[in-house]
Image: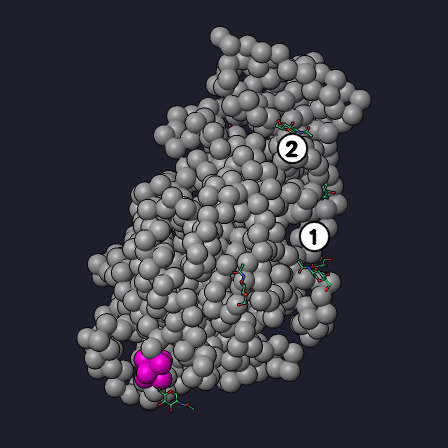
Amino acid sequence: MDSSLKCVFLISLVYCVVKVNSLTLTQSFENQFILFIDDQPLIEHNGVEPAIAVGSSDTNFTEDQGNFIINEDIFEKIELSTCDTDQSGMPTLFKARCYNAEYFPEIAVDVVVEEKDSTLFQKFAVINVTLSGRERLWFRLASNSTEKIYGAGEQFTYLNLKGREFPMWIREQGVGRNLSSPLTQIVESGSPGAGGDYHTTYYPAPIFLSTWNYVISGKQKRYSILNFTSPTRKEIYVHDNELILNVGTAANLMELVNGINLEVSRISPTLPDWIYNGAIIAVQGGTQNMLDKLQQCLDNGVKVSAIWIQDWAGKIVTSFGYRVFWNWRWNEELYPGLDSVISNLAEKGIQVAAYINPHLNVEGDLFLEADTLGYLLKNDQGETYRQDFGGFLAGTIDFSNPLAKQWYADLIQKNIIEFGFKGFMADFGEYTPIDAVFSEPSDPYEFHNLLPVLWASTVRLALEQSGTLNSVLPWARSGFTGAQYFHSMMWAGDQNVDWSKSDGLPSSIVAALSLGLSGFGLSHSDIGGYTTLNGILTRSEELLLRWAEYSVFTPLMRTHEGNKPELNHQVYSTNDTLKSFARLSAIYTSLTPYHQEVVSQVSTLGTPAMSPLFLHFPEDLETFEIQYEFMYGFDLLVSPVLEISKSNQQVYLPSSRWIHFWDDDQQVVEGPTSITINATLGKTPVFFRADSKWAPLFSDIRNRFNY
Ligand SMILES: *[C@@H]1O[C@H](CO)[C@@H](O)[C@H](O)[C@H]1NC(C)=O
Ligand SMILES: *[C@@H]1O[C@H](CO)[C@@H](O)[C@H](O)[C@H]1NC(C)=O
Ligand SMILES: *[C@@H]1O[C@H](CO)[C@@H](O)[C@H](O)[C@H]1NC(C)=O
Ligand SMILES: *[C@@H]1O[C@H](CO)[C@@H](O)[C@H](O)[C@H]1NC(C)=O
Ligand SMILES: *[C@@H]1O[C@H](CO)[C@@H](O)[C@H](O)[C@H]1NC(C)=O
Ligand SMILES: *[C@@H]1O[C@H](CO)[C@@H](O)[C@H](O)[C@H]1NC(C)=O
Ligand SMILES: *[C@@H]1O[C@H](CO)[C@@H](O)[C@H](O)[C@H]1NC(C)=O
C-alpha cells in the first residue's frame, strides 16, 4: 500500500491527511476532511466551510415566450457544520453523515462515494447525496483560486466558468445577453426577461471539467445551479432531496473529454456525405423564389449542398418578423410543385431541407388532430395549453405519452422524410411552462428540462424507423443531459446579427467549444446570425462574410436569412457577395477529406470537431484562457476575425511548428508565440501543423484560392 502524508494550510486551520493508495481518500482531525480522487481534492469539509447546507425556498418560474424569470426567495439555509465519516470501506467506499446539531435528527444528509469500474476513465466514482427533512441542497466540492472549470453545456459568453454561477434551466438564450449593454436594456424594457444574461442558454447541462483532471456529471433534472463563484468551493445547488454525481478522472483534459464523448459516440450516427458538397443555403418565399435564388447562387459559382426552406409549411407575419406556419405539411400554395422540384434537384446533387419543432399552431389542422387525440400538453385546468410564441398561439406535443411520440415521429417520417427532404432544422424545446400537465405522471419540475431530450428522441425515432439515420440530417437547438444520445448535430441558435461577445459572432465560437467539452462534439451556427431588430440591428455584408469564412473550418456551412430577411445583407444580395461566398463554399468543399476525418474522430476518438487549444496543448498555461481560437480537428488552428474593419489579426500559437494557411512562402513559425498576420476579408487566420499529413491538401487549396 502506497501511503503518503499531505498537509493542507487553510486560513487559520492546518490539518494533515493520510492518503491511502493513489486511489481515493483522506481524513484528519474530527470533522475536517478532504476526500481525494486520483490524488486530486474532491470533497472538502470543515466547521468553517461545511461541505453541505440545506434549506427551503419559494421559487417562481415565470414564462413569457420562452424566457423565464426565476424569482427565488431562500428563506432558510442551514449549514451542516458537522460530518461524521465512515472510512471502513476505504479505499473504494467513503461515507459521511452530515448534520447541524440544532436540527438533528430531523435533518441529516448522507454522502456515499463509491468507486466503480469504468473503461472510459482512469478512476470512476459515484457520489450519492441524500437528504431528509428538506428539498434544497447546497453540495460543495473542493476548489482553489487556480482551478479552472469548463463545460456546463452550451455556454455563450464564458468558456472558463470559474467565478460565476450557471443555472441549469432550459430557455431562450435572450437578445443581447448582457444586462449592462444598452441593447439588452432596450430589449428588457420592452419585454422583461427577453434580453437574457451571460448564462441563459438553450442547452445547459450539469456536467463540468476541472483542470484537476476530473469531470463531474450530475444526474439532476430539476432546477439546479452550478455555482463557481467561491474561490474555495465548487457548489452545486439543487431543488431536490437527492444528488447523484458521476466523477471520472484521466491523465489530462483531452482524455477526459474523449471519455465523455466516447460514451455517447457508440450510438451516434455519422453525418451524411451530401453536406460536404457545399453550403446549405437558406431561402424562403415559395418555389419560384427558391429556384431563382438557387440559380443566382449557381450562376455565381456557389457550391450548394442543399437549399433550406424553413417556410415549406407556410408563413405568417408577426411583429418580430417573418415566421413559419407551424402546421407541418407541405404548403402547396406557397410551394407549388415542390415534390417534383425536390427530385429534380436531387438528380443534380442538390438536396432540399425543411423545418419542424415540437409545437403546432392553433390555426392549423394538425393542432386539431393532435388535440382531439389528446396528444398535447394541458394546463392545470385540464385545458390544452395554448402558449404565446410571439404573436401567435401554439400547443406542444406531450412526448411523455408514447402514442403522441409515435404519432409525431410518423408525421416527421411521412411529411418530411418520405416527401424527400434530406435535412431539417429541429427547432425549439425550451418553452415548457412549469404548470404544464402531461400524461405520464412524473415530476413537472423535471419535465421542463427533459422536454428537449424527449423531442430529440422523437426525431431520432423517426430517422431510425425510416432507416435514414445516416442520410437525413436534423440540426437541433435545445438540449439537456441525454440529448447527445439522440442528435448528431446542434446549432448555436439565434445570435444577434452583430459582433458582440455576449450575443454575436464571437459567442457562436464559445458555444461550440463549451458544448464539445460537455459531450456534444458536432455543432455549427447560423452564418450571419439571426436576430435582427428594426432600426437597431441589421446585418452588414462584412459580418456575413466574416461569419462565412470561419464556418469553412467547422463541420457544417449553413446560412440563415434572419427574422427580417429584407433588412439583412444576404449571400444573394449582390453578385460581389455571391462571388466571395462562392469562393468560401468551394474552400469548404475542397476540405472534404479533412472534414470527414474530423467528424469521424468525434466518434472514434471522442474528440470534439471544434475544441479549445488547451485540450491539445495542456502544458501551455496560456491556452486555458483562450476562448476565441480553436482547433478544428487536430491539424488546423483557427482564429476567426471578430471585429469590424480588421485587416490584420494577432494569433497565439502554442508550442508546435505552424504554417499560415494563406502564406505563399509557407514559412514555418515556431510556437509558442504571438504573431500578427494579414487577415483581409475572405482569409480567416488559420494555421496548420507543419508536419500535418494534410499539408499537400492545404497547399493545394491555398494555390487555388489565394485571391
Ligand atoms: C411567487 O408568486 C406568488 C404568487 O404570485 C407570490 O405571492 C410570491 O411572492 C412569489 N415568490 C417569489 C419568490 O417571487
Ligand atoms: C442513493 O442512495 C439512496 C439512499 O441510500 C438510495 O436509495 C439510492 O438508490 C441511491 N442512488 C443511487 C443512484 O445509487
Ligand atoms: C490548487 O489545487 C491544485 C490541486 O490540488 C494544486 O495543484 C495547486 O497548487 C493549488 N493552488 C493553490 C494556489 O493553492
Ligand atoms: C457587456 O456590456 C458592457 C457595457 O457595454 C461591456 O463593457 C462589456 O464588455 C459587455 N460584456 C460582454 C461579455 O460583452
Ligand atoms: C453562490 O456562491 C456564492 C459564494 O459562495 C454565494 O454567495 C451565493 O449565494 C451562491 N448562490 C446560490 C444561488 O446559492
Ligand atoms: C449577376 O450575375 C449574374 C450571373 O453571372 C448575371 O447574369 C447578372 O447580370 C449579374 N447582375 C448584376 C447586377 O451584375
Ligand atoms: C500583408 O499584406 C501587405 C499588403 O498586401 C503585404 O505588403 C505584406 O507583406 C503582408 N504581410 C504579411 C506578413 O504577409
Instruction: Give the labeled residue for mark 1.
Output: 72
CB at disc 1 and ligand 1 closer than 8 Å: yes
Is 407 on the left-hand or right-hand side of 132? left
Task: Work out whether 387 lies above or below 298.
Answer: above
Residue at 33%, 77% (x, y): give it: 301
Q: Quadrant of residue 366?
A: bottom left
- Percent of width and height locating residue 505: 55, 64
Q: Secondary structure at mark 1?
A: strand
Instruction: Give the labeled residue for mark 2.
Output: 143
- Percent of width and height locating residue 117: 39, 25
Main secondary-structure element of the magenta-colored stretch: helix
Q: Which residues are magenta?
A: 294-300
**Sequence-wise, which precedes: disc 1 or disc 2?**
1
- The mark found on residue 431 in the picture is none
Queried whether the magenta region covers residue 299, the answer comes back as yes
Marks 1, 2: nearer the viewer: 2
